[in-house]
Image (tube, grey):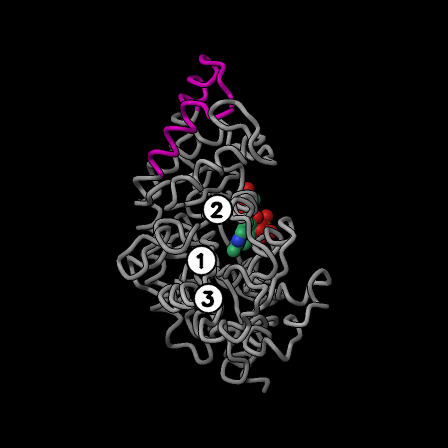
Amino acid sequence: MTEMDYFKDPIYITRPLLPDLEKVTEKMKQIWDSKWLTNNGPLHDLLESRLRSYLKVEDIVLFVNGTLALTLGIKAMKLTGEVITTPFTFPATLLSLDWNGLSPVFCDIENDTFNMDANKIECLITDKTSAILAVHVFGNPCCVNTIKNIAEKYHLKVIYDGAHSFGSEINGIPAGRYGDITMFSFHATKLFNTVEGGALAISDRSLAEKLRALKNFGFDIREDVVSSGTNAKLNEIQAAVGLEVLNIVDIERHKRRFLHSIYVRELSEIKGIRIVTSSDDDGQSFQYFTIEIDKDKYGISRDELYLEMKNRNVHARRYFYPLCSSFSWYREIESARPENLPVANMAVNNVLCLPYYGDLGEETAVRICRIIKQIGVQGRRHL
Ligand code: T4K
């Protein structure tokens, strides 16, 4: 291995987007002076209104993290029975159903975007189905119009897990305007972060009011407890970080868009590598840069590539491996059987997310691609 093939310092899948510490410190001083730390303080409210405009949504409610946002969003909708969803996601998507006593019904995925295959939803609908919970995986948009038509036909609610879709648009319409609710995650590893945090974009104002109560122990504006709420409030320190991150998020998107073009340029020629994340500027959140490896053409498997990269100190990630349907908590469900999810069970072994964040820089991205190319060439020699 030469010096060019190995990184001295680890290269991670991402690094948090961090604003200028002095600017954050100024905001901290403001918080210290006011002694107002949480419970829907002024910075929380300001972030809420700035995000409403940024994401161009009717209403938005902030939460302490994306998982609780989704869990409470589903609770507010009073769903029952079964919810059709995807196995190719982070467990948080599924856990939000468990916490509401709902049964997931797994639907297979598309082999290009890895989103739920909208053409396979209808045959899973029973008289117990109350909703569809779809994920815009890696920021690639779901077939929102097909999902809408099915939901209208069978009177189902539609929930989007848009954890990866901050700031993206679908057919020129902001992602948060589709479905009954859309969740965004503001975790440290996301394009936009509040350290930990999340939000729901909602078009129905009365649902938004229910959610404001649910995240605050069930209190309504008259301080009556009107629902079995919990504590899921985003605090002032999170909001302060979020306000500063929001000021620089467009610059970060711009840097990632550039890195996207570098990756596409360098990887397109490599046999057996398919680029998964679309390059549609408006539709793309630039959250992840994902590739699919065809072992027969590339020379070695995704797992071998992952380990070879790790040996060179490049820490790509195998999101979302293993499939949620194969976790012990879910695998006994009928719809979780591998024969019901052939595409998902194949894709999960071939997908790799590459390091992707603004400060990665062109030179590092090019070196990563050359390493991927070299590993493939060596793999093919041993075939
Ligand atoms: N739905 C979907 C589809 C999701 O992907 C997620 C979360 C959710 C729902 C739930 O939203 P939240 O409740 O989280 O808001 C990460 C994140 O923790 C998780 O938010 C995310 N999806 C998931 C896909 O990825 P890990 O276990 O991969 O994170 P971790 O700690 O290994 O971090 C990845 C890399 O990032 C590290 O190797 C280095 C870097 N890093 C990480 C942290 C936390 C830093 O440089 N600094 C940091 O502070 O789960």
Q: Is residue 112 visible?
A: yes
Residue 154 shows which numbered tag? 3
User: What amino acid type should be assigned to the residue bearing mark 1?
Assistant: Tyr
Residue marked by disc 1: 288
Sequence-wise first label, 3 or 1: 3
Q: Spatial distance from mark 3 to mark 1, Cα to Cα?
A: 34 Å
Tell me which segment is drawn in magenta.
25-51
What amino acid is labelled 3 in the image?
Answer: Tyr
Pinpoint residue 219: horizontal percent, then vertical percent.
54, 28
Q: Is mark 2 within 8 Å of ligand 1?
A: yes
Residue 185's mark?
A: 2
Name the residue: 42% across, 44% down.
Answer: 192
**What amino acid is labelled 2 in the image?**
Ser
Q: Secondary structure at mark 3?
A: helix
Foreground tag (2 vs 1): 2
In the rendered image, residue 351, in percent from the top left (x then y), is placed at 53, 69
* Disc 2, SS: strand
User: In the picture, which quadrant includes the C terminus?
Assistant: bottom right
Residue 252 location (% of width, % of height): 35, 46
Q: CA distance from mark 2 to mark 1?
A: 14 Å
Q: From mark 3 to mark 2, how far is it between C-alphas?
A: 29 Å
Whether residue 47 is in magenta: the answer is yes
- Whether residue 183 is situated above or below residue 290 in the rendered picture: above
Horizontal arrangement in the rendering, residue 375 relative to residue 241 (left or right): right
